[in-house]
Image: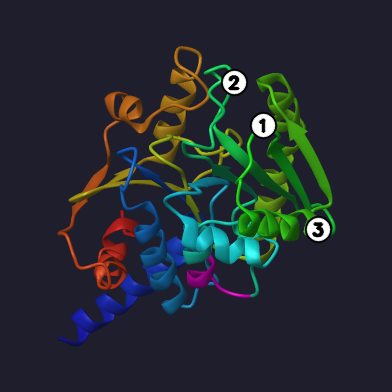
Amino acid sequence: MRQAICDLTVELIDFNLILKMHRNKILIVGLKDTDAGKTTLARAMLSYLREEGFDACGFKPMAGNNVWYDYDVISEALSEGRLYGKDAKFLRKASGGDVSEELINPVHRLWSEPPLINLNLPSSFPSIILDRVTLWSGEPRDILVENKTLSFNNEEEEKLLEKLHHRADDIYKIDDLESLNEITEKYYGQAIRSAYKKLLDRYDPIVIEGYGDVALPWSELDDLDLVVGVEPWHISIYNPDKYLNAVKFSIPTYSNEISTRRIKELVKPVKEVEFLPFRSDERVEMLKEKVPLILDI
């Protein structure tokens, strides 16, 4: 019995040592395009890691929400002169230290919904209201990229946007893809890169959440320690090197945003963990019980 207890102690020490040395950057991706469970799993993992004594923090390089479906959190953020979504808010609450939603999520897009969309615009032009881009080199710098063809057409919402304008350091108004692409090229990667560096300097490990079913939420994520895919009923754990190689292999054929559906055809998970549906107020705690199975591979 004593030997068994000693063996168990060594096992636990080794597990924490492995986590300290080899699980510093964990990517969570969705294996379906909506409601895969990424944020819930990220919250569960952050909660578990912090309870184990690690100074863990979440990171969502890019995110977006819809003015119609996510109005609660949008109006809350705009009333503060800010723009963030519910995922960033959840990750901030689950993370340690004094960290803001803008640091956790440096690029956030606010999507429109008919009837705001101008039907006279080219169909290829994205139906965005605005992007909030926060640079973290030195003092935080907020940049707004606004679709000048759209408006809330509502006095109350326009007042909320005024608060956001007042807080912004720079505002760009666009009405074509060329302008959007130029600004994206100039600022978006810089914002993500500077936020990521700041988080890496302050926290360990970092739990990175993707968006939709995009296989890699930021092209410069090239030194991951673990990749975890989630969808209803099961979690897939991937070797990070094989996963990243599959993404790089696919980009020339498809696009910069590869779906995890494509990656699943190219690389097999090293482990799968099953889970059952739970009530919404139980999901984080129930998934937290699966975290040791995910990390201990």
Q: Position of residue 225 (x, y in %)?
A: 47, 48
Residue extending furthest bottom?
2
Magenta segment range?
Answer: 91-97
Residue extending furthest top?
253
Q: Quadrant of the N terminus?
A: bottom left
Q: Position of residue 12 (x, y in %)?
A: 34, 73
Q: Mark 2 = which residue? A: 121
Q: Position of residue 80 (x, y in %)?
A: 67, 67
Which residue corresponds to the image point at 45% horizontal and 43% vertical from the top-left? 211
Q: Is disc 2 in contact with disc 1, using a CB cutoff of under 8 Å?
A: yes
In the rendered structure, which amino acid carries the disc numbered 3?
His
Task: Estimate the spatial distance between the alpha carbons at disc 3 and disc 1, rounded to whole Å.
Answer: 20 Å
In the rendered structure, which amino acid carries the disc numbered 1?
Thr
Queried whether the magenta region covers residue 168, the answer comes back as: no
In this rendering, the label closer to the viewer, 2 or 3: 2
Task: Estimate the spatial distance between the alpha carbons at disc 2 and disc 3, rounded to whole Å.
Answer: 28 Å
Give the mark nearer the N terminus: 2 vs 1.
2
Q: Mark 3 = which residue? A: 166
Residue 121 seen in the figure: yes
Which residue corresponds to the image point at 29% horizontal and 30% vertical from the top-left? 264
Q: Mark 1 = which residue? A: 149
